[in-house]
Image: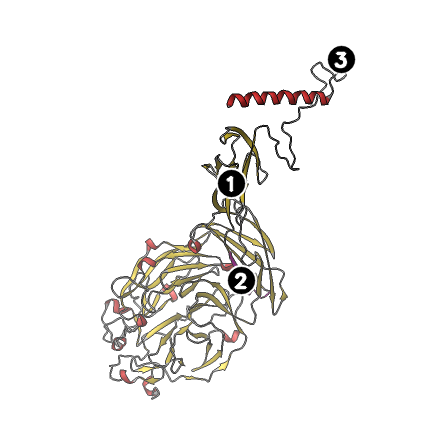
Amino acid sequence: MPFPCLVLALAGCLSVSSAASAKGFTYESVAAGLDDPWDLAPLPDGSVLVAERCGKVHWIGEGGARAVAVDLSSRVECGKKDAGLVGLAVSSGSPPAWLVVLYRGKGPSFMKVGKLPLKKGATGYTADAAQEVVVLDQLPAFKPEHDGAGLRFGPKDLLYVATGDDEKPETAQSLTSLGGKLLRIGLDGKAPADNPKFPGAPIGSLGSIWAIGLHRPTRIAVDLTTGAVVVGDRGILSSDEVDVIAAGPANLGWPRFEGKSTYGPGADVPMSKPDPMLPAHVSEHPGTPGWVVVSAPYGGKGTRPFPAHYTGAIAVADGYQKTLTMLSKAGETWTAEATEDLLPLGVRSMAEGTDGLLYVVISDTSGGSLGRVLFGDTPPVVTLVTPKDGEGYSAGAVLALSATATDVEDGAIESGFAWTVTLQGPGGEAGPVVETKTFQGKSASYAVPADAAIDGRLTVRVSVKDSAGTVAEAHRTLQPSVGEVTLSATPGGFTLTVDGATVTPPITRTWIAGKRVPVSCPEEATLGAAKDLYVFDTWSDGGAREHDYIVQGGKPTLTCAMRVYGAPAKDAGGTGSAFPEPPPATGGGGASSSGESGCAPTTEPERSAAVLLLLAALALVLRRRRA
């Protein structure tokens, strides 16, 4: 049975036109890899805070740069459906002073609102979990699907908090319960003196009630100019509603009414004053679940605003559909314009950014992401050329970075490329950040530190901005190239010094490719049953007896070779001589090559032969003595 207009005398009978098509909107992804994101808060500098349901709040900046702003995981209960850190808000000002969170706490089943000082640093915005102050506690939260998930700042930095009925429909109309309510409080948790007065409502925390009759509010939004509050409220059957509250006190009608129809099981629940108001919009989804998401009336400011006729419109989405609906009001009539198949499934929250774009968080089976809706521009298509897919990196290597981008409007894009290279230490995705480097241009190069870890990882991101300012991104994660080096010796029986340790070859060691490893072979050693004297001959990589070996990828072998003393030494040409040639005669020292000393001149071959005979005799004597 439709809502009777006479019941709605206080609100007026509003009509909603049939849905029209909204053309020109496009959607682009900003940051992927989030874990079940549930709410977001745009910041004055254009960056965004995103809350993950299990307690982490991420800061996401230009080009996809990101960092954990605060981690509340230890105090957030997220094991039950739809429960956890579900609301996020930032106070006004530049920089904002407070980060406010709405979450289900561990232990007893209650929701709470906490505030934390928010600071802006070199790597984005951060807050200290140890500084959290609980503003509002003991909000009903027995049933996770009925917790409520609405948290936003309004004018004068007053907080609006929406609560669910906790699966007790009668509480939505009760003035002695905070269940099923829209609350308005200060940052001190107290009700402002100008809050509306509900007939028969007790004083104390119940004085914070701004509106009653809510069922399962999924999102709220507040017009910072007028103070009007937009509520997205899930139905129990097939009707989700969007309510626009110009001022309190207000009654949204649950459980007597759902959408614009009466709800049979709630017919006997006593209704409190004022009389229920009519929704601005009802989303019907017979036989399928719903999750209604709303934004504040569109401001139309920033560098990339929607067309002027959307100023003041309310954006509406559904987590189970792909449609974006823009609600515009003329007089007492709301007009709905819908764009089909625009958004990904899993929309959890929306908010207008300082640039005029509509930012959206998505939570789906693949994890989660941050995206945005823009008008009249197609995002660029970015291709990361190098490093190639599957390519690894080596310590000390220089990686070539290159990318291309095309755009429907611009064609091939030659400028607006921004690179971010992040090197992490051991620990995979959670590993500590060793360094982050940024570059500009279609191509660049990155020098990997010589001490890069064997179990780290390297992430290369490139973002490209087209002529309309639309940004798209591509990224690739590289794993270190590894060398399994076998150290051997010929002949066997002597030790090597490798990376400061004494080892007995053959032995295998694993390092990151490109690492410089100090290696040393003995200068001499007595080996074999005959106790022959051996001296250093060569390393297989051509290095000196003591040198830094540069690790090669794969499974290379590095061999130290020694030779019997007096045996020919190897040279680069593969030949050798038993002993080095003596130095040539010089003109100094009083002797001359012309025989002026009075002795018969000695030819070079004769002198060399004599030296060789002398050295051979000496070697024979030494060998016999050692034996």
- Residue beneath disc 3: 596
Instruction: Tell me which label, 2 or 3, sits earlier in the chain.
Output: 2
Residue 419 vertical position relative to residue 396 in the rendered view, above or below: below
- Tag 2: residue type? Glu
Q: Is residue 48 left or right of residue 609?
A: left
Question: Residue 261: percent from the left, percent from the top?
Answer: 34, 85
Q: Quadrant of residue 137?
A: bottom left
Pick whichever, 227 or 577, lies toward us: 577
Q: Nearer the viewer, mark 2 or mark 3?
A: 3
Specify the farthest residue to the right. Answer: 594
Res. 488 mark: 1
Instruction: Indicate the position of residue 117 as horizontal and vertical percent values.
Output: 37, 55
Q: Nearer the viewer, residue 490 or 361?
A: 490
- Based on the picture, tell me whether residue 20 belongs to the magenta stretch: no
Residue 470 belongs to the span the image colors magenta: yes
| Residue type beneath disc 3 | Glu
Q: CA distance from mark 1 to mark 2?
A: 47 Å
* Label 3 residue SS: loop
Q: Provide the residue span drawn in magenta.
A: 467-477
Give the residue at the far top of this rendering: 598
Classify mark 2: residues with Cα within 10 Å, few (<14), some (14-19) or many (20+): many
150, 486: nearer the viewer: 486
Residue kind at label 1, given as amino acid type: Ser
